[in-house]
Image (cartoon, grey):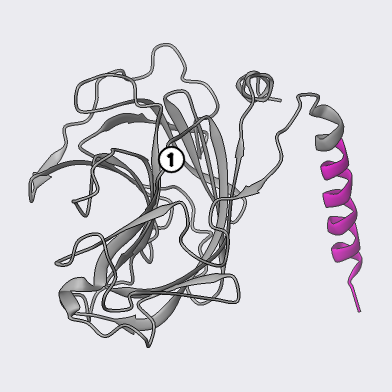
Amino acid sequence: MISGLGIFCGAAFVHQAALAAKSSSAPRSAWRPLFNGRNLDGWSIFEQGVGNSDPHGAITIKNGMLHMLGPGFSGPDASSFGHIATIGEYADFHLRMEFCFGERRFAPRLLQRRNSGLLYHLASDRDRLFPDCVEYQFEEGDIGDAIMVNTRSLQGPQLGGTPLWPNYFPGLPTEYAQPTTGGGIARQWHRHAGNYERLDSWNTIDLYAFGDQAAHLVNGRIVNTLFRMVGRDGAPLTRGRIALEFEAAEVFMRNVMIRDLLPQEIAEIRSGR
């Protein structure tokens, strides 16, 4: 039996969704698959200690789903780090995907939290585990964090308890936080706000990236926002390849989709509608 409160909340949700649909007047582009569910056409691969191939079966595809570091992975443990990356570059987009963790973990992270991630605005290098990029972190407890890999950004402050979006206010900080350097990589780490992750089931990930800003959503809630993203040369960071990574932990990914954010829709987002 559905309680009266449940009926009320359900009705309120439908009403709000209808209002949102009516308030959006900007044209929207159609979703298209970024991963086709059958093979890695349109993607390159990098596997630690191997290069641009997958001789150890780190990636399998079945029933339209990417399975990374599953039972078919034959090792060695050093090769349990890698990624697949799009051949093409993307700018001004909305990406949506689902992921969940498996149970398998590999040295040197046998006792550490399971980890994966979505890399965007990725540089063109195909011979490095971490080319310059922004990482949307999928680590347990940190899903939604942003790690700037040889890049920088201003994190949206939490004003009123929620990350600032969609515009950066005058008078807010304009100095970039100092990165931490290790392993030849300078990293800024911007922590997420709010815990909406599911550790033992599927998570829906949304990424809005347009101009030099981005928003990270976990299961429908904004948990992190980035503004004035720049590359190591100080130029605005607005485009690049997209990658899905594996970091010594089994992970499943599916329904990886992308759509263009058209200028009218970006203007509407900036207006707060």
At x 44%, y 28%, the residue is 213
Residue drawn 29% across the image and 70% down it: 54
Image position of 207 with respect to 137: above or below: above
Residue 112: quarter of image: bottom left
**Number of marks in the image?**
1
Q: Position of residue 241 (x, y in %)?
A: 39, 41
Q: In the drawing, does residue 267 fall left or right of residue 190? A: right
- How far across and how far down the image is residue 259, in percent? 62, 40
- Does 272 appear above or below 200? above
Placement of the N terminus among the 4 image quadrants: bottom right
When the figure is inspected, residue 138 is found, relative to residue 174, above or below; the finding is: below
Residue ID for mark 1: 88
The location of residue 182, given as percent across then percent down, is 8, 48
Q: Is residue 68 a member of the stretch shown in magenta?
A: no
Residue 35: image x %, image y %? 53, 57
Q: Is residue 200 left or right of residue 263?
A: left
Q: What is the span of residues highlighted in magenta in the rendered image?
A: 1-19
Name the dominant secondary structure of the magenta segment: helix
Q: Amino acid at mark 1?
A: Gly
Between residue 138 and residue 47, name the one nearer to us. Answer: 47
- What residue is shown at x 46% (from left), y 20% (from top)? 168
Secondary structure beneath label 1: loop
Q: Residue furthest top?
A: 170
Establish if 242 lies above or below 172.
below
- Residue drawn at 25 percent across, 33 percent down: 151
